[in-house]
Image (cartoon, rainbow, N blue to C red):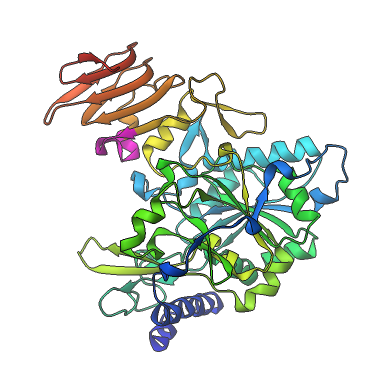
């Protein structure tokens, strides 16, 4: 493998990235890909911080806390699961604003409100960097950016790298997960830069999570304690059953994700009774502690198996920023309100935040409206016809009103006219080979619609 990596290393960056990959590869060869389930325990109280017990930040407090803060948005992902070839952060969400626009506006409003200069920093991947830099230039925003590592995909059978040279096509490479953030910060000089500025409290989150704004109560706790790493978790629901969680193993704390779970234990892992919290990927770290841990830092390998269009099976070796928790002596979980977790994985998630279910709060986070019949987001399931973003937009003349929706399933080839209101429990089914269009200005409440608009009450 070393010889193969030397052939694809042409400068200091590619050599650095090759070393990153070699470390992942050796760990993959020498460590089991799944955990010893008999040693796993749900997280105990000793590792949990109660948010409600924290002292709230007061607006007249010392501005020293604000001077220690920085924000990093994980911005390496493409919207490929939604058929988007560009950066996920450039998908339009509300009022023409993209996820990137929301992140920028949240940062601007925070600094205006608190008369501060908390920097917003983007971690891009080689897949997103060019488009994001162009977008930032157009917005005339003074945002710092750095790029994470670029690693070679490997064949599943031979474990040989796909690229043969440093200039091989981009589809032969991959970004090795957001666990690569701290190594990339160090290589790009961002880590020392922030520490040198005194900004040692870092809030990290996914750029598509519009609920992940700076929480000064948590920032104050980080500033006034010796905590090195803090993971925001929230109550697990059926929709989050496969999300990462925190567990105890070998008298320590570990972030456990479903690829690391033995097949025979997946049902227990997904159980809401056994593991009751999951990782929001909102992470707080002390950067001075990160620098000390970095030379020996290790994380669990996530083996991401994929199939090329040619039919060949390949492997990507990845890590997650949640997996870094095991490296810190003073690492904890903090349970936060659900509003701080608003991810967009599929178009059905996008539909929810594009609708009147959510309103833009003063801090430019998206908040679920309080005047709903239930205090949580409805379950929305759209058929595969809606999977691709372009097709999704074609199927809605305008986004329906969903503020009073509790549950919706759309199955088949369905189109929606303009100014539609959906309320309560809704099931819409287009028969195989048929197209079903919901007429403009329809008001539908607790109905099953099937075929040629045959209505049936849902009790």
Instruction: Point out the image quarter for the C terminus.
Output: top left
Depth check: give the residue in front, 310 or 272: 272
Does residue 338 show up magenta in the picture?
no
Depth check: give the residue in front, 410 or 459: 459
> Which residue of the protein is positioned furthest toward the left in this rendering?
433
Residue 237 visible, this orientation: yes
Q: Is residue 430 above or below residue 153?
A: above
In the picture, residue 391 is in which quadrant?
Answer: top left
Depth check: give the residue in front, 413 or 333: 333
Q: Is residue 440 above or below residue 100?
A: above
In the picture, residue 32 is in which quadrant?
Answer: bottom left
Does residue 387 show up magenta in the picture?
yes
Q: Is residue 336 above or below residue 444?
A: below
The answer to whether residue 169 is left or right of residue 412 is right
Q: Where are the magenta residues, as a range?
A: 381-391
Residue 201 image offset from top left, x and y in percent: 73, 56
Instruction: Point out the image quarter for the N terminus.
Output: bottom left
Residue 63 image offset from top left, x and y in percent: 86, 46
Q: Residue at x 47, y 55 (%)?
A: 244
- How many marks are shown on the rendered structure? 0
Q: Is residue 454 above or below residue 126?
A: above
> Which residue of the protein is positioned furthest toward the bottom in this rendering?
3
Residue 373 image offset from top left, x and y in percent: 48, 19
Residue 192 visible, this orientation: no
Q: Residue at x 45, y 49 (%)?
A: 87
Q: Residue at x 63, y 78 (%)?
A: 295
Residue 296 image offset from top left, x and y in percent: 61, 78
């Amino acid at each position: 493998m070393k010889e193969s990596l030397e052939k694809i290393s042409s400068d200091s960056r590619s050599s650095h990235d090759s070393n990153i990959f070699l470390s992942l590869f050796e760990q993959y060869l020498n460590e089991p890909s799944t955990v010893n389930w008999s040693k796993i325990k749900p997280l105990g109280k000793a590792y949990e911080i109660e948010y409600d017990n924290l002292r709230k930040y007061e607006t007249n407090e010392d501005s020293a806390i604000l001077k220690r803060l920085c924000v990093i948005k994980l911005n390496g992902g493409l919207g490929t699961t939604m058929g988007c070839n560009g950066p996920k952060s450039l998908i339009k969400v509300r009022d023409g604003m993209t996820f990137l626009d929301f992140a920028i506006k949240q940062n601007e409003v925070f600094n205006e409100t608190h008369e501060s200069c908390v920097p917003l920093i983007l971690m891009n991947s080689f897949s997103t960097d060019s488009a994001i830099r162009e977008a930032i230039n157009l917005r005339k925003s003074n945002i710092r950016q750095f790029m994470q590592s670029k690693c070679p995909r490997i064949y599943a059978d031979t474990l040989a790298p796909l690229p043969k040279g440093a200039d091989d096509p981009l589809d032969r490479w991959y970004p090795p997960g957001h666990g690569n953030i701290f190594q990339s910060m160090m290589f790009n000089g961002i880590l020392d830069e922030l520490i040198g500025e005194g900004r040692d409290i870092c809030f990290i989150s996914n750029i598509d999570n519009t609920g992940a704004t700076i929480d000064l109560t948590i920032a104050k706790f980080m500033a006034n304690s010796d905590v090195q790493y803090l993971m925001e978790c929230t109550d697990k629901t059926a929709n989050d059953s496969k999300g990462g969680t925190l567990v105890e193993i070998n008298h320590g704390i570990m972030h456990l994700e479903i690829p690391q779970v033995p097949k025979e234990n997946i049902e227990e892992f997904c159980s809401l009774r056994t593991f009751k919290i999951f990782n929001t990927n909102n992470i707080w770290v002390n950067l001075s502690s990160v620098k000390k841990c970095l030379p020996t830092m290790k994380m669990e390998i996530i083996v991401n198996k994929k199939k090329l269009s040619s039919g060949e099976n390949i492997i990507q070796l990845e890590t997650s920023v949640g997996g870094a928790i095991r490296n810190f002596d003073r690492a904890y979980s903090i349970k936060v309100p659900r509003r701080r977790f608003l991810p967009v994985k599929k178009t059905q998630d996008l539909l929810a935040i594009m609708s009147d279910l959510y309103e833009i709060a003063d801090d430019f986070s998206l908040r679920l409206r309080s005047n709903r019949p239930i205090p949580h987001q409805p379950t929305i399931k759209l058929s595969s016809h809606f999977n691709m973003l372009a097709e999704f937009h074609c199927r809605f003349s305008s986004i329906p009103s969903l503020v009073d929706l509790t549950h919706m399933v759309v199955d088949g080839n369905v189109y929606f006219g303009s100014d539609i209101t959906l309320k309560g429990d809704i099931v819409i089914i287009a028969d195989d080979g048929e197209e079903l269009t919901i007429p403009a200005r329809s008001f539908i409440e607790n109905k099953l619609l099937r075929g040629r608009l045959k209505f049936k009450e849902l009790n």
